[in-house]
Amino acid sequence: MKNFTESIQYLISLVTDDPHLESAWLSTLAHMEHLASQQVLGNISASTPLHFVADIQEHAADEARHRDIILSLRPYPQAKDGRYEDLRQRLRAVAESFVLGFFANPVLLQAQSRFAAYVHGAITIEQFPFQIYSAYIEGTSSPRIREGMQEVLADEVGHIQLGKKFLATLPEADRLSLQELQVIEKEMCLLMVQRMAVLVEEFQNHELQTDPVTRASQKLVRVIADRPYAQVAWVHALGHSELMASLHMQKIFMSRDLPMPDLMPEHVSDELRHARLLQRSVVLERRKWLAVPGYRQLERRLCHELERYLTRYFSLMMRQISDPEQLYLYGAWGLEMRVFRHYTDIMRGTDNVGVAQTISVILQDEAEHTRMVHEEIGDREFMDAQLLKWVRQTEDVVFEHTASRVLSLIETQDQMTEFAPLYQRAFPVRTMDRQPEPEMELR
């Protein structure tokens, strides 16, 4: 995987290849400056010291001015055609998910006041212009664009100094970890840049056929990537399934009146945290979709399908494995393998940078869970290669069946105008074409 420097240089090489693409890129940067201005003004509240209000308003005005400067730099203010307009809209959506996702990250949400949130957010997200604009200034062939972007970048130094001045006034109890916030910003910025590069490549190669996929789980990932409503509903449902998985694991022992394994409390705690993280990552978009008739029903059905998946999976595990601790370890191992594969696929295919960053955090936890489960299986002398193979195959069949049913639900939803896939002029829409899933005998 490319590092940030390589990724941003590659993206800049793509968008500067064509003045119409570069105009779409500049529209995206201007939209981010507009969002930044809104975020800055939105954080003025009763907690804002009165003697700082004018400075904050000036900060917001600077961001709005940057928006106007960047818009004026576009070689073509209007999109060339419908395809280019769709590209502009999609890149702006990715950028918006970065800005809103950063200001909704779990660390920043710990801020004791909106003023404290503004101070920490302003200091850290102002890294973005230095990371992105500097590379763009070097990569563009237009002297006019280079000069305009240098003017914008010069202001950003003052914004960082302003944030540091405000930070110095905060009591220690109101301070958050700038190091953690900077890590999150860098991770999200990289994910955004990589996703934009993929979209520009797809746009440029729109006539090329995408790799055919036959498995329902792979089709599901591609289908939800084209349908924001489906992705929001599915990520919310995955959060619900994290909660339900923790309950299933605990039930193995509670129903037998047995003490829980040493690993389980921490494991359950992580699953509950993952549930909150996933659902929080789509909370803003979900509010919008909940107002659309038909969405809530789809979300409930997706949650129900994942409940059925877990019930079927653990039922088959219990038929095959009688020892409770062995059942827990092998059952958890099978679920962790699914999480790795499915969550990784979603992270790579989503336009939502906040969702992608949330999943990357969860996958770090899952790597540790898998290591601990493997060690425990070995320490308990439970290791059985044939049983591991059976667990993986069984989980695979159960999940593929679930994915197929979910695709059917989304296909039905697509018939409603409000849920039609977006950006169809610029990007091929993945269809639901499904072949019958090969069945494996489950004993």
Image (tube, helix red, strand yellow):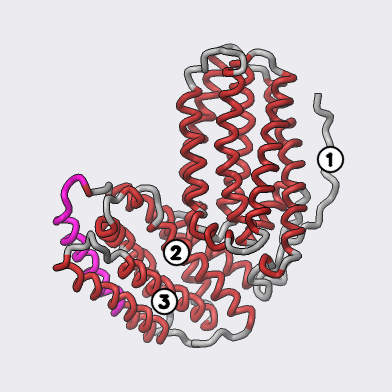
What residue sits right under mark 2 in the picture?
8
First in sequence: mark 3 vs mark 2 = 2
In x, y percent, where is residue 435? Answer: 84, 50
Q: Nearer the viewer, mark 1 or mark 2?
A: 1
Residue corresponding to mark 3: 30
Magenta span of residues: 151-173
> Residue 130: x percent and y percent?
32, 66
Judging depth in this view, the residue of 179 and 310 nearest the camera is: 310
Give how far apart the Cα atoms at labels 3 and 2 are: 17 Å
Distance between mark 1 and mark 2 Cα atoms:
42 Å
In magenta segment, residue 164: yes
| Residue type (three-letter) at the residue carrying disc 1 | Pro
In contact (CB < 8 Å): disc 3 and disc 2: no
The question of residue 379 being in magenta is answered with no
Q: Is residue 374 above or below residue 416?
A: above
Q: Nearer the viewer, residue 129 or 230?
A: 230
The label shown at residue 65 is: none
Q: Residue at x 51, y 65 (%)?
A: 94
Disc 3 marks a residue whose amino acid type is Ala
Q: In the image, residue 266 lies at what x, y percent?
A: 45, 27
Q: Which mark is residue 438?
A: 1
